[in-house]
Image (cartoon, rainbow, N blue to C red):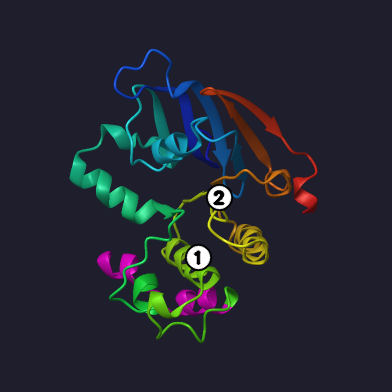
């Protein structure tokens, strides 16, 4: 890999239960530091499957995934893979996946605490930037859905991962909150130089990414958005 390459997906194919038609077929792309990749396609096209493979949660049937430094996550032992994932991947799920018995602040800090590397200055910067200053002592059930999504994003970003992955981050939000989350992801990319992959059905959202991977029946078409730098 080149020195600025964060992720390389090489000829990835994935089948569920030996189905005749694969969920993904011979997918390849590379992401460099600070790039944003939008993954688009109809429901069932393989978007979530691809994000799980890139996020080291699902080993592909064939092909490989490589990270910065030539790391092959699926060649690691299970314990080393889990450690790599905790340290290097920030994953924002559709359902937010917040822990109900922890406050918003505790949810955000959890991943950092597991690694013993809480950076309070950076944590304060992230939560302030995401407008969460007054939410940190509240529990998830006391937050709006938009606030819950922002907490999930803050939790993913606060540990400074090499890659942030968001699986349809606006799917469960109303239009107003969805637009706010879209703006936050762009700001995070610009402010922190964060490399981002996100899946979406929203064309305007996808149009602002530096690259787009369009999936149809598991087959991908990769394009570059030359206007994205002017977001």
Q: Is residue 153 above or below residue 66?
A: below
Depth check, mark 2 against mark 1: the one in front is 1
CA separation in Å, label 2 and label 1: 19 Å
Q: Position of residue 69 (x, y in %)?
A: 41, 40
Q: Position of residue 121 (x, y in %)?
A: 47, 79
Which dot marks residue 139?
Answer: none
Pointer 2 local density, CA inside 10 Å: few below 14, some 14–19, many at least 20: many
* Residue at 49%, 80% in the rendered image: 124
Say if the magenta span includes residue 109. Answer: no
Q: In the rendered structure, which segment of residues is drawn in magenta?
A: 110-128
Which dot marks residue 195?
Answer: 2
Which dot marks residue 149?
Answer: 1
Of the image marks 2 and 1, the number of the one nearer the N terminus: 1
Query: Looking at the rendering, in which quadrant would you find the C terminus?
Result: bottom right
* Residue at 72%, 48% in the rendered image: 208
The extreme top residue here reads: 20
User: Label 1's element?
Assistant: helix
Q: Please state if 204 lies on the left or on the right of 153 as rendered.
A: right
Q: Please state if 90 lies on the left or on the right of 83 as rendered.
A: right
Secondary structure of the magenta portion, mostly?
Answer: helix
Q: Position of residue 151 (x, y in %)?
A: 47, 70
Report which quarter residue 99 is drawn in: bottom left
User: Label 2's element?
Assistant: loop
Q: Position of residue 152 (x, y in %)?
A: 45, 64
Viewer-side residue, 4 vs 122: 122
């Amino acid at each position: 890999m080149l020195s600025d390459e964060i992720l390389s997906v090489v000829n990835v194919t994935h089948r569920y239960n030996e189905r005749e038609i694969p969920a993904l077929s011979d997918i390849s792309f590379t992401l460099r530091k600070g790039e944003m990749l939008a993954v688009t396609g109809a429901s069932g096209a393989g978007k979530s499957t691809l994000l799980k493979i890139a996020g080291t949660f699902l080993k592909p049937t064939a092909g490989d995934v490589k990270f910065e430094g030539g790391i092959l996550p699926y060649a690691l032992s299970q314990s080393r893979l889990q450690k790599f994932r905790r340290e290097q991947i920030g994953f924002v799920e559709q359902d937010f996946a917040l822990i109900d018995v922890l406050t918003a602040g505790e949810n955000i800090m959890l991943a950092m605490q597991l690694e013993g590397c809480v950076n309070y200055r950076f944590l304060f910067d992230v939560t302030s930037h995401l407008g969460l200053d007054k939410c940190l002592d509240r529990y998830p059930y006391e937050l709006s859905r938009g606030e819950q999504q922002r907490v999930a994003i803050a939790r993913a970003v606060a540990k400074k991962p090499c890659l942030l992955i968001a699986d349809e981050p606006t799917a469960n939000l109303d239009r107003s909150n969805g637009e706010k989350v879209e703006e936050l992801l762009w700001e995070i990319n610009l402010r922190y130089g964060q490399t981002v992959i996100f899946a979406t059905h929203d064309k305007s959202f996808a149009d602002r990414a530096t690259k787009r991977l369009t999936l149809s029946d598991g087959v991908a078409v990769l394009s570059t958005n030359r206007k994205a730098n002017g977001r």
